[in-house]
Amino acid sequence: MTAPNTTHVVVGFNTSLLAELDRLLSPASVLVIEEPDVIEARAVEQHLKALP
């Protein structure tokens, strides 16, 4: 399921890429797909809270 504003899908979490996309794209327009164990190990949720 995607949000109505999603215009881009990224497979694999990458802080640098998301920071650049944050600068270029509208808020809530990127859907990130990542493995649950990677999300937990890399504290992805904390990183995403810093983005709009």
Image: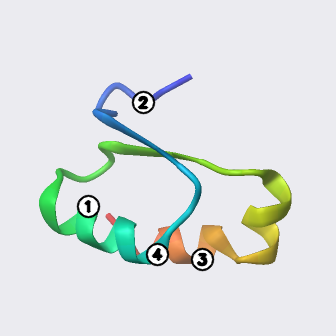
- Which amino acid does the dot numbered 4 rest on? Thr
Classify 10 Å Cα crowding around label 2: few (below 14), some (14-19), many (20 and above): few
How far apart are the alpha carbons under marks 3 and 4?
11 Å
Q: Which of label 3 and label 4 is nearer to you?
A: 4
The residue indicated by pointer 3 is 46
Q: Residue at position x 42%, y 30% from top? A: 3
Instruction: Looking at the image, tell me whether mark 3 or mark 4 is earlier in sequence order.
Output: 4
Element type at mark 3 = helix
The residue indicated by pointer 4 is 15
Instruction: Looking at the image, tell me whether mark 2 or mark 1 is earlier in sequence order.
Output: 2
The correct choice, above or below, for 41 with respect to 27 in the image is below
**Which quarter of the rendered picture does the C terminus lie within?**
bottom left
Farthest-out residue, left: 24
Classify 10 Å Cα crowding around label 4: few (below 14), some (14-19), many (20 and above): few
Is the residue under label 2 in contact with that under label 3 (CB below 8 Å)? no
Instruction: Looking at the image, tell me whether mark 2 or mark 4 is earlier in sequence order.
Output: 2
Q: Which of label 3 and label 1 is nearer to you?
A: 1
Residue 3 tag number:
2
